[in-house]
Image (cartoon, helix red, strand yellow):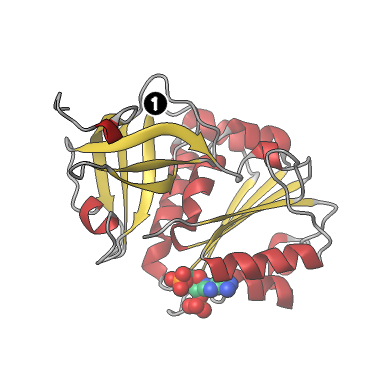
Amino acid sequence: MSEELPKAYRGIDFLKVTEVRHWTDKTFSFRCERPASFRFRSGEFAMIGLENGDKPLLRAYSIASPNWAEDLEFYSIKVPDGPLTSKLQHMKVGDDVLLRPKATGTLVHDALIPGKRLLLFSTGTGIAPFASVIRDPETYDKFDEVILTQTCRELKELDYGKHLMEEIANDELLSEVVGDKLRYIGTTTREDSELTGRMTDWIRDGRFAEMTGAPMTAENDRVMICGSMAMLKDHKQLCLDAGMKEGANSEPGEFVIEKAFVD
Ligand code: A2P
């Protein structure tokens, strides 16, 4: 970091990128160093970005790594004309990524009251905060069953989620904690695959209940939702229809939502 950086960079950490992985032409993930003093709760987001003249270019990103991890992982969309992602997607190992070391968010255990099943509904890169939540042992302390769903347009976009599941299965410690409590259901909407259709439709027409053994209910289920505004709206309505109350950090409830951040 240069000595002459403008004021706007005060309090921002410069972190070395340690891994970059391109999953599709629209998505990539990367890892970077974690500052020793940076704390977060699994499921939270922080502002990350790049150096950009007088003012750093920062956007909200869900942290995909769990709170105990030694490094930070992010899963990002590539928007061709997006101010940040159009540049970020070209990052290489050894480059610097900027972090404002303050995490926040609602997709956290603190915002949910106790329940039996934890349902994590995502579309696209909305899976990122759940990549964190499903690798946190607290999740399995609190719930008997954890079901992560991800709906994407094409099959290849489900690779990140499938890889996550493999990573957990291959991790000696984590796989013991997770046991057989975790399930990933990936569906596609614009390409044929084993499982097709929006999860909202699955909930409405009974496929979700059939696949998971029970319909979504306010009594048993706690829900976290992350995706586009339209997706949040529809999933939220299904939760309200089931008699659930929206939770917040200040007042925990039965479901919580957060926009998947894109630029
Ligand atoms: P679909 O292909 O039927 O629109 P997007 O890239 O537009 O954000 O979509 C990502 C995935 O989310 C797609 O599979 C898309 O399905 C699905 N999706 C979009 N809108 C909704 C919604 N309102 N509720 C549930 N799923 C949605």
Where does the C terminus fall, quadrant-wise? bottom left
Q: Which residue is mark 1?
A: 70
Residue at 21% x, 41% y: name it.
54
Q: Position of residue 50 (x, y in %)?
A: 24, 43
Classify 224 as above or below 202: above
Left or right relative to 210: residue 17: left
Bin the neighbour count of mark 1 within 10 Å (Cα to Cα): few under 14, some 14-19, many 20 and up: few
Give the mark count.
Answer: 1
> In the rendering, at what x and y percent does residue 157 appear?
39, 64
Quadrant containing the N terminus in the rendered view: top left
* Residue at image location 56% in from the left, 41% down from the top: 133
Left or right of 238 in this view: 147: left
Element assignment for label 1: loop
Task: Classify residue 225 as left or right of residue 154.
Answer: right
- For residue 227, above or below residue 147: below
Image coords of residue 256 (percent x, y): 67, 51
**Amino acid residing under circle 1:** Glu
Question: Does residue 215 show up?
Answer: no
Q: Nearer the viewer, residue 224 or 258?
A: 258
Q: Which residue is depicted at the point 46% across and 32% down?
A: 102
Which residue occupies the foreground of this view, 221 or 186?
221
Report the residue that reaches farthest toward the top.
Answer: 36
In the image, residue 2 sits, relative to residue 210, either above or below, namely: above
Is residue 203 or residue 8 the one in the foreground? 8
Q: Is residue 170 above or below residue 121?
A: above
Residue appearing at x 62%, y 40% in the figure: 108
Residue 65 visible to an observer of this rendering: yes
Seen from the viewer's position, the closer of residues 65 and 37 is 37
Q: Quadrant of residue 261?
A: bottom left
